[in-house]
Image (cartoon, rainbow, N blue to C red):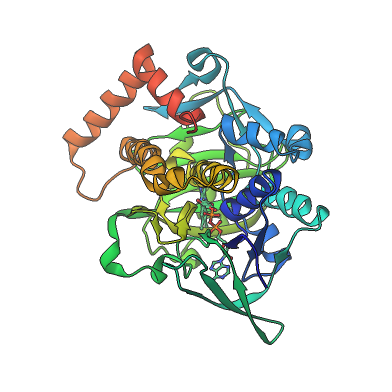
Amino acid sequence: MRTQVAIIGAGPAGLFLSLLLQRAGIECVVLEMHTREHVQTRVRAGVLEHGTVQLMHELGVGERLKRLGLEHGGIELRFAGHGHRIDFRELTGGKCVTIYAQHEVIKDLVAARLAANQPLLFEVSDVRLADLESKSPRVHFVREGKSGTLQCDFIAGCDGFHGVCRPAIPSSALQLFDRAYPFGWLGILAQAPPSSQELIYAHHERGFALLSMRSPEISRLYLQCQPEENIENWPDERIWDELQKRLAASGWNLTEGPIIQRGVTGMRSFVTEPMQFGRLFLAGDAAHIVPPTGAKGLNLAVADVRVLAHALAEFYRSGSAEPLHRYSETCLRRVWKVQRFSWWMTSLLHRFADDNAFDQRRQLAELDYVTSSRAAAQSLAENYVGLPME
Ligand SMILES: Cc1cc2nc3c(=O)[nH]c(=O)nc-3n(C[C@H](O)[C@H](O)[C@H](O)COP(=O)(O)OP(=O)(O)OC[C@H]3O[C@@H](n4cnc5c(N)ncnc54)[C@H](O)[C@@H]3O)c2cc1C
């Protein structure tokens, strides 16, 4: 097999890239290790930045998003038992975010790719990359028990944090920046109408809590927990009891309901520099991880592949490899700003093991500042709805 761009991974990065390349008339093949069913039901992120929503409409995959997505013009920061709204529309000239689950995005992208009869191969195993520094790199893989080789001009490593693309780069060529947090998130999906129209980020002495939602019938809720928390220790009553305590505010009630999904997610900040080696370009979680507090993981993956698609289009249109050479540099400017924001939101809202009374007072003062200063609230709002795409 031969193609222009081999894309490893059918997550948000790989699938958005495939549609962007398709639109630019560039051939690509997507190789994914899991089944279609698996990638379309994997519960993950749910907040889409303004620019991500716009891109879905531009790519002609926004019909269900328009119908089912919930536009949010703000969030609530809740601390010391009171809620304070950050009004995105007012602070950012009319921008908002949209709640639409990542697996719904994936369904829309997969459907568009397959409807256009473009290659998207599921259940591919043993992916190995070769000749990355040549003009014709190769991807070896196994599918339906047969070995195959995909020859291409470029490889896009969109295979997430645990994929094979980043490890295919000699470690001496990479610099890794890493921060692990001393806590995780216990997340649930509950069959309960959301108790708020917008997300509530709660700072509490017992730890952080987040109220989010997937639809008018389904709530998504999170609790700060130990990084290696055993979910078995959290029966339904304990989860609801803790959520009730951390989210409590006078005159407000948290609606409970059957828990239909639960899990613990670790929290880390991670960046690979550079995000390219020879003809391999890393995008999304393969290159960086953010703690989910800023709701940025998926959106950052989309921002990367926009830059990559633009650079590849320029290469095939004019022969200029300049934008490709600058791919890392271009992406990393935005990546580090998003890292900063995600770290800041995390530090603002969570309890840390070595917190003392001073740290808690300082956090409360910062929350008070963010919710009472227009300049501070505007900074939060412009980051949350999404910094400009390159
Ligand atoms: C449990 C969980 C919860 C999350 N919750 C949130 C959240 O609430 N908010 C938020 O903003 N972000 C969240 N994130 C992060 C967000 O989902 C990711 O940032 C986003 O999925 C990144 O997209 P991606 O395409 O780069 O990587 P992925 O979505 O990881 O996609 C990579 C794809 O590559 C495939 N793959 C991997 N290895 C290979 C291989 N060797 N060969 C072929 N295919 C391969 C994988 O199966 C996968 O389909 C969460 C992540 C996880 C894991």
Q: Is residue 349 left or right of residue 122?
A: left
**Which percent across, then down, holds residue 1?**
68, 73
**Which percent across, then down, holds residue 354?**
19, 48
Of all residues shown, which one is farthest toward the front? 319
Determine the residue positioned at 68% across, 52% down: 106
Q: Quadrant of ligand 1?
A: bottom right
**Which percent across, then down, holds residue 180?**
30, 56
Q: Is residue 135 left or right of residue 27?
A: left
Q: Is residue 373 left or right of residue 286?
A: left
Res 195 visible: no
Determine the residue positioned at 54% across, 38% down: 211
Determine the residue positioned at 43% across, 29% down: 383
Instruction: Choose between 262 and 343: the one closer to the eye.
Output: 343
In the image, residue 379 above or below residue 189: above
Place residue 100 in its image quadrant. top right
**Which percent across, then down, holds residue 274?**
34, 53
Res 221 visible: yes
- How many marks the image carries: the answer is 0
In the image, residue 6 above or below residue 200: below
Place residue 348 in its image quadrant. top left
Determine the residue positioned at 59% across, 55% down: 14
